[in-house]
Image (cartoon, grey):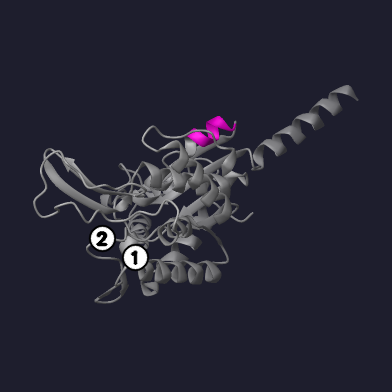
Amino acid sequence: MKKIFLVVLLLVSQLSFGQSNDNAIRLFVIGNSFSQNATAYLPNFAKERNKQLVIGRAELGGCSLQQHWEYAEAAEANPGDPKGKPYKGKSLRMLLSEGTWDVVTIQQYSYLSPDLDTYSPYAEKLYNYIKSIQPNARIVLHQNWAYRSDAKKFGRVAANQLAKDQKEMWQKSRAAYHTIAEQLKVNIIPVGDAFNTMASGTEFLYKKDMAFDYENPVYPNLPDQTNSLNMGYYWKDKEFVFDPNHANEAGRYLGSLIWYAFLFKESPEKIQYVPNKVPVDFAAYLRKVAEKTVKF
């Protein structure tokens, strides 16, 4: 009887270990530089809060849903085709087959995010493909953000038509993500919503420095970019560079807070970690925004 009890106990423990829970998650991210930005501090948060987190990645800069799908399609047609192995020599199938993944995320390329037509049929094809390899995985959409208010151009809302400003880019992008989420019956990691809360609020609002001479910048001077969530202006080898799209440290912090709260169903206000380049009071406000944005 004692031996039988031990065998049963062992089986139960093995079954329990195989089930995902809110403290142990295997996450696989299919995306691009925006997903890299938005998950930058996720491992820091998980470690601080004693969560077990494993992250697998299939990320390529500027990669759209269509491109990810076409790479997967090429690999299925010919497993030896280098075109189907863009992820450091591996195919999407190879990466997805490395163990069991609890959550798999997909997202659109930021420039195409406001254009609903660019999601189909690729989001559905990727969804079905992932399910064929990881049938028990929870698939979710990572909603990326609109470009900074002073960007020189914004994302595409339709063929040959760009959004006129940050607000329109966010509105059309949000609508597209929600339409696809409804079609696929999946949830959304609302990073874009959090960025918009910051962009449309009054507290800690970024405003372009109108006193700076952008046409004739003098190294190493920079405009005042207080409260920006995006890289903005910076010097690279004495070249004046402008990136209104990618997240800076504060934006990466906010994005990671959203991912953490969504995945682990725990208040981001419990997080104590703050990156060196993010002011403490700003970080505290970003945690509040994340808390209000994620519903669980």
Question: Left or right: 160 with respect to 202?
Answer: left
The picture quadrant where one finds residue 95 is: top left
| Residue kind at label 1, given as amino acid type | Gln
Q: Residues within 10 Å of mark 2 (few under 14, many from 20)?
A: some
Q: Is residue 204 magenta?
A: no
The picture quadrant where one finds residue 151 is: bottom left
| Residue kind at label 2, given as amino acid type | Ala
Instruction: Judge whether 276 appears above or below 204 on screen.
Output: above
Quadrant assignment for the N terminus: top right
Q: Position of residue 25 (x, y in %)?
A: 57, 41
Most extreme residue toward the front, as rendered?
211
- The label on residue 151 is 2
- The label on residue 166 is 1
Looking at the magenta stretch, what is its main secondary structure? Answer: helix
Question: Left or right: 291 with respect to 92?
Answer: right
Instruction: Judge whether 219 appears above or below 125 on screen.
Output: above
Towards the viewer: 200 or 90: 200
Instruction: Judge whether 150 appears above or below 272 on screen.
Output: below
| SS at mark 2 in the image | loop
Please give the name of the residue rendered at 47% of the width and 56% of the height, measured from the top-left corner. Answer: 194
Tell me the magenta residue range.
Answer: 44-49
